[in-house]
Amino acid sequence: MAVTIDRDLKAKCPRTALGCVTARVEVAESSAELMANLQACEQSILKLPEPRTVLESPQILATRAGYKALGKDPARYRGSAEALVRRVIAGKGLPRVNTVVDIINLVSVESRLSIGLYDLANVRGDIVFRAGRARETYKGIGKYDLNLEDLPVFCDSLGPHGSPTSDSERTMVTNETRQVLGIIISFGGKDGLERWTERTAELLRIHAQGRDIETELVA
């Protein structure tokens, strides 16, 4: 399976880069240690003199600019990293789902980068990161049908299945998932991506019994 960036998307968003992590995992309820890490991450934002300044971080601003360049309103369709940070600032905290999802949310907030997470048992063929086309939709996780036109999306041979805004139910991680692909999405270049792929790999090893872990940068 290869992950590539579409030429047209790259032309509009030339600094787009992806950090990919694949691993065999065991999905379970998060440990007390991982829960403590999530809480510490939340507190690191809430204890800032002005927590909302996190929303102006270069990574979040680059994601907004990428959406704008593709023709999508970043005020209506936010990247998941920004959405998670806004939850924290509003006092709602990060969702607690399972080990793997919680790890991805933790790294997303730490890095300020949106991350797609996919059950590889439900991915078909290679994956391309491109702009959504007219009339393309899918059911987002816990959401209504998402209008994918002009939204950056990940597509396999069956069509779109993920986006920095919301991934699809088709490839979502469940308790039955045994192998995952996480894709860290940067619209501001590949600097720092290696750090965050390694951080993700480390957390998967520690908290999700991660093994056969591989990382790759795509730019």
Image (cartoon, rainbow, N blue to C red):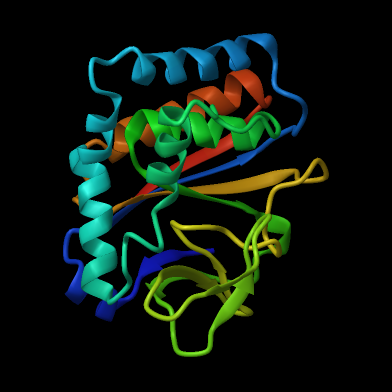
Residue at the image position 61 percent from the left and 33 percent from the top: 95
Does residue 50 appear in the picture of this structure? yes
Q: Quadrant of residue 136?
A: bottom right
Q: Quadrant of the N terminus?
A: bottom right
Residue at the image position 53 percent from the left and 36 percent from the top: 104
Task: Say which of 55 and 24 sits in front.
Answer: 55
Q: Position of residue 75 (x, y in %)?
A: 33, 59
Q: Position of residue 169 (x, y in %)?
A: 70, 61
Q: Is residue 49 above or below residue 145?
A: above
Q: Position of residue 130 (x, y in %)?
A: 38, 74
Q: Is residue 188 left or right of residue 113?
A: left
Q: Is residue 200 left or right of residue 70?
A: right
The residue furthest bottom is: 134
Residue at the image position 53 percent from the left and 58 percent from the top: 166
The residue furthest front is: 90
Q: Quadrant of residue 67?
A: bottom left
Q: Is residue 23 left or right of residue 85?
A: right
Q: Is residue 87 above or below residue 3?
A: above
Q: Quadrant of the C terminus?
A: bottom left
Q: Is residue 87 above or below residue 186?
A: above
State how many labels appear.
0
Does residue 198 appear in the picture of this structure? no
The residue furthest right is: 176
Task: Say which of 180 and 94 sits in front.
Answer: 94
Q: Is residue 133 left or right of residue 211?
A: left
Q: Position of residue 205 (x, y in %)?
A: 59, 24
